[in-house]
Image (tube, rainbow, N blue to C red):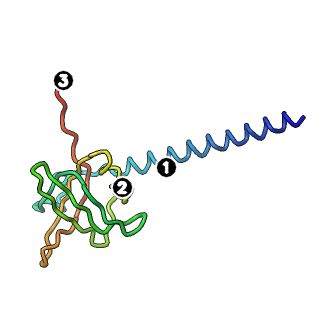
Amino acid sequence: MNTVIRLRDSLKSASCAIIVAVSLSGIVLAACAGHISDSQNDNPEFTGLPEFTGLIVDVAQESILDFESIRVSDDRGDVLQFHADGRRFDGFAPSHIREHILLGLPVVVTYQEIDSGILVIVNLADAPAEPTEPF
């Protein structure tokens, strides 16, 4: 009888673990889907503002949801620091930014320079994927 009870308890635990794993997977997928942004060309609000495309090399995190600044390096080796200025950007929580750092995924930063020379992020988006050559 004890074996049956232990087996039933084990099945309950396994079922709970599967439910939790599936739920977490759904949350992660929903969060990742939210990071896809329109480019500046599709949004007239950003027309005429400068863009900088490159790899994020560092993030200054304020909290689990907010970051203070990011440093981005372009393909020429120029590194610029951009400030969030207290704003949040859809899909770009510090955890997603760290994913970009780890995987080497480029971003496009639309920004404006304020009087003191600080670069403030207006929009942050995944860089379009470069086409690959066929084998």
Q: Quick check: 15 above or below 123?
A: above
Mark nearer the N terminus (2 vs 1): 1
Q: Amino acid at mark 2?
A: Gly
Quadrant hosting residue 51: bottom left
* SS at mark 2 in the image: loop
Mark nearer the N terminus (3 vs 1): 1
Q: Amino acid at mark 3?
A: Pro
* SS at mark 3 in the image: loop
Q: CA distance from mark 2 to mark 1?
A: 12 Å
Quadrant, the C terminus = top left
Residue that numbered label 1 is attached to: 27
- Residue 134 marker: 3
Density class for disc 1 (Cα within 10 Å; few <14, some 14-19, many ≥20) is few
Density class for disc 2 (Cα within 10 Å; few <14, some 14-19, many ≥20) is many
Mark nearer the N terminus (2 vs 3): 2
Towards the viewer: 12 or 26: 12
Q: How many marks?
A: 3
- Residue 91 marker: 2
